[in-house]
Image: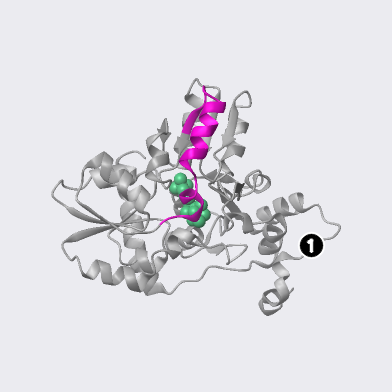
Amino acid sequence: MIQKEQVRQKGFIDRAIPNVDIISEIGRMKKEKNAVILGHYYIDSRLQDIADFVGDSLALAQQAAKTDAEIILFLGVHFMAETAKILSPQKKVLLPDFNAGCSLADSAPADEFEKFVAAHPDHLVISYVNTTAAVKALTDIVCTSSNAVQIVESLPKYQKIIFGPDRNLGRYIQSLTGRDMLIWNGACHVHQQFDVNEIVRLKLEYPQAKVLAHPECNQTVLILSDYIGATSGILKYSIQDSAKQYIVATESGILHQMKKASPDKIFIPAPPEKINDVSCACNDCIYMKLNTIEKVYNTLKYEYPEVELDESLRLKAFRSINKMLEISAKLGL
Ligand code: 13P
Ligand code: SF4
């Protein structure tokens, strides 16, 4: 059996796997080790197809809290795997590549966020799940994009709120609820770059198409959208709605489930902003796409790399995530 130190060396986790049917080997190891694979809608389509459960960040947290598997192999980004570990400390939580971070989580360093919170002691702190455990430990209630509005509305009207780290989601919630909110100035590099002019150009090309957007997009994009919601909401809307064409302003991975559910419909990824007339085609989240089938195989085989957390930090972060899960369960979300 290979030792952890050897795995750590020279990108062992990423190495090619000769003469092995990777998919069936992953299936065999999953059974043998009582492991479950949880995947976010933004990962590569091939990985979505081998996951036991694919969902948005709320559904993934709910799955992580209730699974009876001994190992959770998380196909997403670091804050998602960390959330799974916070909720299920007795389980081994594996994340194939620890470089799978999140630009939005990075936009709220815990030490700066702590000062901001300390400067406004009369505010209740709501943080998006796209944050580190250290920020969650400074938070009263965590939320995701599929329950943020309901969580804010569950609070008394007079309650002042700090919302972080996504400024676009924060402004969007504020516009719907009219609440007194101080909003942290963070953003996601993928959603931030969808360009309203490019979407208008596409609308002229496909006049019947509806625009579906994630609330992390800029306000100008949200204003011209027919539907705004979390990844799960976007998928559900595209299934239930009668239109045949959609312009999708979120990470491109979600298109896989949309096409699978509605093969007769046309889904057009919203183009990012053009620089010098060239589009960067960066509606892929570079972090999500660090997950590969080879890494999944090696991670499951060597049970490495594993998410580890200081217990006192875990307990502090647990409170705010658990509060979100309690409110969501009460509201049937
Ligand atoms: P969801 O909560 O919609 O799954 O979104 C997560 C995310 O990272 C958005 O960029
Ligand atoms: Fe983070 Fe943006 Fe990637 Fe979502 S799409 S994981 S918010 S960097």
Farthest residue in the top direction? 242
Q: Is residue 263 left or right of residue 211?
A: right
Residue drawn at x 65%, y 48% is 47
Q: Is residue 170 above or below residue 304?
A: above
Front residue of 293/327: it is 293
Front residue of 329/250: it is 250
Q: Is residue 186 left or right of residue 266?
A: left
Q: Is residue 126 left or right of residue 209?
A: left
Query: Residue 63 location, x and y as percent?
Result: 48, 49
Is residue 184 in sight in this rendering? Answer: yes
Q: Is residue 313 left or right of residue 52?
A: left
Q: Which residues are magenta?
A: 187-211
Query: Residue 135 location, x and y as percent?
Result: 36, 66
Dot 1 alpha-carbon crowd within 10 angstroms: few under 14, some 14 to 19, many 20 or more: few
Q: Quadrant of the C terminus?
A: top left
Residue drawn at x 42%, y 30% is 226
Indicate if the residue with disc 1 has its beta carbon within 8 Å of ligand 2. Answer: no
